């Protein structure tokens, strides 16, 4: 049986999970940020992650539909604006598409998601289903990987611009927006779980939800590593399966 | 636009998918059957696949709940008996547990599923969700990998007994039962899709459902390969993560 944690202890426990399980520690990201990947491997990352990006508003709408009060729905609604855009701004999905085309992929091919790895789809869909099927508290907690994203973004942008001549600042515009959006979203979600996790069991469920989300991100990089860093493991029909697909760009 | 296929043409198209995408072609299975794995790698396979086995009756009950007539429900019900057992027989899950303990794993650890790879959970849950959310025709079609299982089982049993001194015939009892169950189940499901796929679009959906299921099986082996054949990629908390888990047996 675990003791009840104070709000600050809960935050520290969440940060400890990030320090151990967040995907900045994955070998694929280390290669990505240090210039250890070739252009095709960077394309595979951009292509697969597009599916994750494209499902984020679906995830957020699923969560929004479960929020019982106007105040929190209005706050969560901003995430839809951030990712799907509005009159003033194109939104995160469009920015990610710019990244993908900026590294040489065809926009229609990316948007079709035809060439993504099955594991990408399984992991991302698992996240959407988690947000639909678990408690609202766990659903909110699963967004808390955003507590850790500013660090990885800073590393990534600097590393990718320094090491890849096919990556331009314009292609990385997605990350500039996230540097302000993610902390704002994470602040709300952290305060929410601190306020609504009243029992040790609820606090443990919050921690488990964050661990689950770290697994969702980590598994996507495992898939990329297995398919595109270790040669010969590209599933049939996925990007760069030489047996059957022609690559774009 | 595809033309309508005759029942025999549809069967041939299904077999062509199996010939290309079924997981007997995966490098992990080739290693498993040829004696190329060590005991820990065989344990990892048995441990992870236990989760797949344990969810099969959940998948079948989900499908059973969607069948509209007594006759087909009674036929599909046999799958629950096969996997969950009855007075006369222990059932497939119990037989798989015997396989897992037979290769040296602790039964409680296996049944907890605490040490499985996240990708195993994502892929297996994707299968259950597919059967719940897609059309009934696609749900039935996704079971058709059983058309191909007798071949892989024959290879596997012979190969494992020949190459691993820690594998006994008793541990492989699961597969003996499947050699008669799987063809019976596959015959019914094949006749069902031949009878109920009336349009080219429905036939293409049937083929896509089988491809999806092949991806579910393939992704599980990708995960095992990445974690246990390529050293150093075991996710935190999974079986043989030296940083935090103690292994059983």
Image (cartoon, coloured by chain):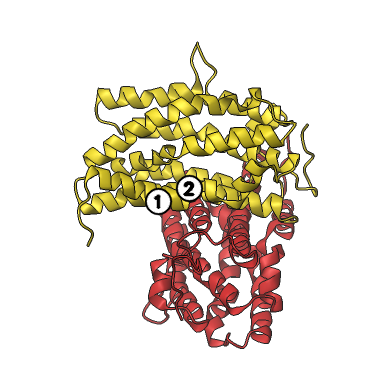
Chain colours: A yellow, B red
The number of numbered discs placed on residues in the rendered structure image is 2
Establish if B221 lies above or below A61.
Answer: below
Marks 2 and 1: in contact by CB < 8 Å? yes
Seen in the image, is A77 located left or right of residue B10? left
Q: Which of marks 1 and 2 is nearer the N terminus?
A: 1
Mark 1 neighbour class, 10 Å CA radius: few under 14, some 14 to 19, many 20 or more: some
What numbered label is drawn on residue A22?
2
Residue occupying the point 62% across, 65% down:
B231
Quadrant assignment, res B201: top right
Establish if A61 lies above or below A193.
Answer: above
Residue B138 in view in this figure: no
Looking at the image, which is closer to me, B174 or B135?
A: B174
The chain letter for the residue carrying disc 1 is A
Tell me where residue B169 appears, x and y as whole percent: 57, 87
Quadrant assignment, res B19: bottom right
Residue occupying the point 48% across, 59% down:
B236
Tell me where residue B105 appears, x and y as whole percent: 47, 78
Looking at the image, which is closer to me, B190 or A84?
A: A84
The chain letter for the residue carrying disc 2 is A
Seen in the image, is A180 located left or right of residue B161? left
Seen in the image, is A132 located left or right of residue B142? left
What numbered label is drawn on residue A17?
1
């Amino acid at each position: 049986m675990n003791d009840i944690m104070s709000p600050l202890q809960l935050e520290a426990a969440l940060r400890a999970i990030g320090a151990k399980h967040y995907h900045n520690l994955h070998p694929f990201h280390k290669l990505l940020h240090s210039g250890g990947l070739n252009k095709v491997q960077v394309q595979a990352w951009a292509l697969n992650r597009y599916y994750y990006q494209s499902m984020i508003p679906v995830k957020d709408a699923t969560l929004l539909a479960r929020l019982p009060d106007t105040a929190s729905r209005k706050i969560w609604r901003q995430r839809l604006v951030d990712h799907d855009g509005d009159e003033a701004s194109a939104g995160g999905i469009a920015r990610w598409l710019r990244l993908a085309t900026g590294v040489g992929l065809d926009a229609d091919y990316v948007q079709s998601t035809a060439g993504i790895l099955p594991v990408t789809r399984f992991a991302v869909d698992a996240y959407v289903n988690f947000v639909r099927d678990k408690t609202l508290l766990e659903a909110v907690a699963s967004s808390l990987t955003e507590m850790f994203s500013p660090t990885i973004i800073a590393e990534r942008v600097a590393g990718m611009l320094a090491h890849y001549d096919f990556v331009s600042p314009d292609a990385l515009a997605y990350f500039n927006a996230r540097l302000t959006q993610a902390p704002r979203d994470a602040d709300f979600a952290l305060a929410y779980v601190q306020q609504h996790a009243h029992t040790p069991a609820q606090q443990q469920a919050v921690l488990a939800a964050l661990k689950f989300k770290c697994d969702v991100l980590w598994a996507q990089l495992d898939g990329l590593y297995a398919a595109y860093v270790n040669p010969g493991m590209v599933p049939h029909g996925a990007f760069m399966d030489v047996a059957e697909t022609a690559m774009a760009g």
